[in-house]
Amino acid sequence: MEVTVALALLGLLATATVAMVAWTASQQARAGSVYDGVEAGHVAVQVLGRLVRSAGAAGRPAVWEAATERLVLCGVPWQDQVLRGQVARDGEGRLVLAAVPPPAPPDDRCAGADPPAPIDLVPGATFQRVRFAVDPASPGPPEAGCGPGPSRTCAGVRGLYVWIEPRPVDGGGIRPVHGYVALRNPGGR
């Protein structure tokens, strides 16, 4: 009788130990995924910062258009060429610099060639959402965007606010990573 009780208790203890080890492993994997997502968000903000600060070749504007979920940059030095392109999430959630969709900005007002294929700016990372807002030259709160129209011109924009939201892990969201990028060359039109 005592042996049976002892074996039952040992069985319960072994089952509880296995369950605890499995739970700990799943929590470590989740924490690793959350860390990877947050780290990828920080890398994305840094990459966007370098891209935006280097844009604006030949004294032309760096930003042609800023919308909530996309950004069109002009005069971006990339390897041995100067590009213009749209920064946005692609269909897979990657942050890419891709060709500007029609109507493209005029060459004399937005320097650079369209990239021949989308450039993955943070290889191996995908994001739930990417958002932009502009810091206007005039005092006031950030604006949703600017663009080629005369009422929304990007001339004089001082900087960009960027929010990167990593993909959720196991149904739980990860807080967005955010940053501010001051434009080196706000330019004018």
Image (cartoon, grey):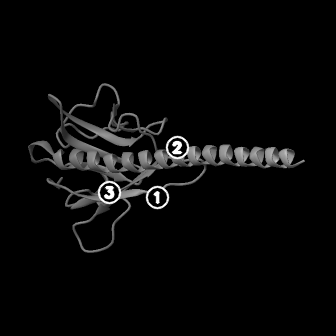
Please report whichever mark, 2 or 1, sits nearer to the chain's N-terminal start: 2
> Disc 3 versus disc 2: distance between alpha carbons?
41 Å
The residue that disc 1 covers is 175
The residue at the point 21 percent across, 46 percent down is 50
Disc 3 marks a residue whose amino acid type is Cys
Q: Which numbered tag is attached to residue 146?
A: 3
Q: Is mark 3 on a helix, strand or loop?
A: loop
Please report whichever mark, 3 or 2, sits nearer to the chain's N-terminal start: 2
Give the crowd class for mark 3: few <14, some 14-19, many >=20 residues within 10 Å: many
> Disc 2 versus disc 1: distance between alpha carbons?
18 Å
* Observer able to see residue 187: no
Disc 1 marks a residue whose amino acid type is Arg
Please report whichever mark, 1 or 3, sits nearer to the chain's N-terminal start: 3
> Disc 1 versus disc 3: distance between alpha carbons?
26 Å
Give the crowd class for mark 2: few <14, some 14-19, many >=20 residues within 10 Å: few
Looking at the picture, how far across and down is residue 76, in whole percent? 19, 39
**Labelled pair 2, 1 in contact (Cβ < 8 Å):** no
Residue 45 is left or right of residue 15, and the answer is left
Give the crowd class for mark 1: few <14, some 14-19, many >=20 residues within 10 Å: some
Disc 2 marks a residue whose amino acid type is Ala
The residue at the point 31 percent across, 53 percent down is 147
The residue that disc 2 covers is 29
